[in-house]
């Protein structure tokens, strides 16, 4: 009875460590999870001789772990209760993956180092397979446990986030082997090497940073509006703010910086409602607003202000001309081919904006993966959908070439790697995380987005409607971040333009996936 109670306490402790072992939740638990969180659970699971029992218990354990880590999906104020079904399916799917992995973990296999690394490689392949579920699911790789510090993420410049997962699982397995054979010195050597590897590599890698840096001034604009203020929701109409009032809020934020030197003004995804091209604002009323927030006297003449009505695009172009800066802003784009969730780039002196159309769309919310889901989507007021963008966009600025991504596109390593290969020296992301208020989504999203810097050796700047807007340098060091949610914030940040080539930017996920498959095939052949 006493032994069973101790085992239960160890399993609960392992659950707490792994479930909380992400930078969004606990730095201490992240460090523990990267070394012994999984090993604690496996130590108890090895006492079960029956494979079916081990599979069942490990599956349930990891389902509950995922239920905690993905708990942001239970914030259904705006997305509807239908998301809970997807939440349950994902937790079960990931639990089954971990159950399969646990079957491979036994005392005999852990005696051989090649088997240990093959098991770690198997887990990497299972995590990688999640990218091929509908639009791809990037959240919750085990490697996030090593993202607790910029230092330990530097090794992602070789293997990306899946490389971090490989190290986390291999380290836990190495510790488990020490517990099973405590008298073998080589087991301790392997464990110490795996624990120290991310730290030693991180120290070496960050020493390459140059002291003399070219810089770019980016103004991060965070409007800080709740979703029911930005959009009309049934039963919440009293909270809705008209697009004109939303623009006045943005102009008030920009007015604080009207005497500063700015290169790029970065605004979030879906900064204002309605299509960019829709002529809906009376030009005389807009002119008065511009005088109030940007000028004290007469505003200079601008194209289209002689018309009776102007559009969201005209607003943005005016701001670009006034500040003599690129304005990067998220708006809906209507074209002959359909509607797109887009990022527009307005540049001073340029008549037509450059447009990037979002390529990775959210199922049901932004695109319909299956026609039979149409009725379900309609229940939650979703009746129109976006088209998929087809190509990346690289913008030439006098100081740097930069690439664009929208929302959780910045969590896809391969997508952003291609931007680097096309010459981008800076990544700009436009995000709107307030679909899931009062949750850990924004922190988890930010942790994943930051990894793109070390993977590709270039900095990233991101603007959100509500936290976290930030600038992170090419070594994953946070330069500035805006965490306040509903105050309406801005910050002018000098972005260091250091960049360097990495193994990952050249080969992408192919390197770690090829290694994992090779280890697994070798393991199968020897067996």
Image (cartoon, grey):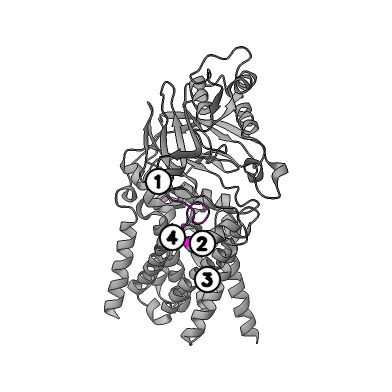
Q: Which residue is mark 3?
A: 92
Q: Nearer the viewer, mark 2 or mark 4?
A: 2
Task: Please tell me whether the stretch drawn in magenta is mainly helix, strand or loop.
Answer: loop
- Residue 66: percent from left, percent from top: 55, 65
Residue 352 place in picture, x, y as percent: 41, 28
Task: Establish if 319 lies above or below 343.
Answer: above
Residues packed near mark 2 inside 10 Å, few (<14), some (14 to 19) or many (20 plus):
few
Mark 3 or 2, closer to the camera: 2
Percent from the top left, x then y, of residue 190?
A: 39, 67
- Quote the CA–CA distance across marks 1 and 4: 16 Å
Nearer the N terminus, badge 3 or badge 1?
A: 3
Residue at the disc numbered 2: 373
What segment carries the magenta color? 360-371
Residue pointed to by mark 1? 389
Dot 4: what SS? loop
Residue at 53% across, 17% down? 306
Q: Earlier in the sequence, mark 1 or mark 2?
A: 2
């Amino acid at each position: 009875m006493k032994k069973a109670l101790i085992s239960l306490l160890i399993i609960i402790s392992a659950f707490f460590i792994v479930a909380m072992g992400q930078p969004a939740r606990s730095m201490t638990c992240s460090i523990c999870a990267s070394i012994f969180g999984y090993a604690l659970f496996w130590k108890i699971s090895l006492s079960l001789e029956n494979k079916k029992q081990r599979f069942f218990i490990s599956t349930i354990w990891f389902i509950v772990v995922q239920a905690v880590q993905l708990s942001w999906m239970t914030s259904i104020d705006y997305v509807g209760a239908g998301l809970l079904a997807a939440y349950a399916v994902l937790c079960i799917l990931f639990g089954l993956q971990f159950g399969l992995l646990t079957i491979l973990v036994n005392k005999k296999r852990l005696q051989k180092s090649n088997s240990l690394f093959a098991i770690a490689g198997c887990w990497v392949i299972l995590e990688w397979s999640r990218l091929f579920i509908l639009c791809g699911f990037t959240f919750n790789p085990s490697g996030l446990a090593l993202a607790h510090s910029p230092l330990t993420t530097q090794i992602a410049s070789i293997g990306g986030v899946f490389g971090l997962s490989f190290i986390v699982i291999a380290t836990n397995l190495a510790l488990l082997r020490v517990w099973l054979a405590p008298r073998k010195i080589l087991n301790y050597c392997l464990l110490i090497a795996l624990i120290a590897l991310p730290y030693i590599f991180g120290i070496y890698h960050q020493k390459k940073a140059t002291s003399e840096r070219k810089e770019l001034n980016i103004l991060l604009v965070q409007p800080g509006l709740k979703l029911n203020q930005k959009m009309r929701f049934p039963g919440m109409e009293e909270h809705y703010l008209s697009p004109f009032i939303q623009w006045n809020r943005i102009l008030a934020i920009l007015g604080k910086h009207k005497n500063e030197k700015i290169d790029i003004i970065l605004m979030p995804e879906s900064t204002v409602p309605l299509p960019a091209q829709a002529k809906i604002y009376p030009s005389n009323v807009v002119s008065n607003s511009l005088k109030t927030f940007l000028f004290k006297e007469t505003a200079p003449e601008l194209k289209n202000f002689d018309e009776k009505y102007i559009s969201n695009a005209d607003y943005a172009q005016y701001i670009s001309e006034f500040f003599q800066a690129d304005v990067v802003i998220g708006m809906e784009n209507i074209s002959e081919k359909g509607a797109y969730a887009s990022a527009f780039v307005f540049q001073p002196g340029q008549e037509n904006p450059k447009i990037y159309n979002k390529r990775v769309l959210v199922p049901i919310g932004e695109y319909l993966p299956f026609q039979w889901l149409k009725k379900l989507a309609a229940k939650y007021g979703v009746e129109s959908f976006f088209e998929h963008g087809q190509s990346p966009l690289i913008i030439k600025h006098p100081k740097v070439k930069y690439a664009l991504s929208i929302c959780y596109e910045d969590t896809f390593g391969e997508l952003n790697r291609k931007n680097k290969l096309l010459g981008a020296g800076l990544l700009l992301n436009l995000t709107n995380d307030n679909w899931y208020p009062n949750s850990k989504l924004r922190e988890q999203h930010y942790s994943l987005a930051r990894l793109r810097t070390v993977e590709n050796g270039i900095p990233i700047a991101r603007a959100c409607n509500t936290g976290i807007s930030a600038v992170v340098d090419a070594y994953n060091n946070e330069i500035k971040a805006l965490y306040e949610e509903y105050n309406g914030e801005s910050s002018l940040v000098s972005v260091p333009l250091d960049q360097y080539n990495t193994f990952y930017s050249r080969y992408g996920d192919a390197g770690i996936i090829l290694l994992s498959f090779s280890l697994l095939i070798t393991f199968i052949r020897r067996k």
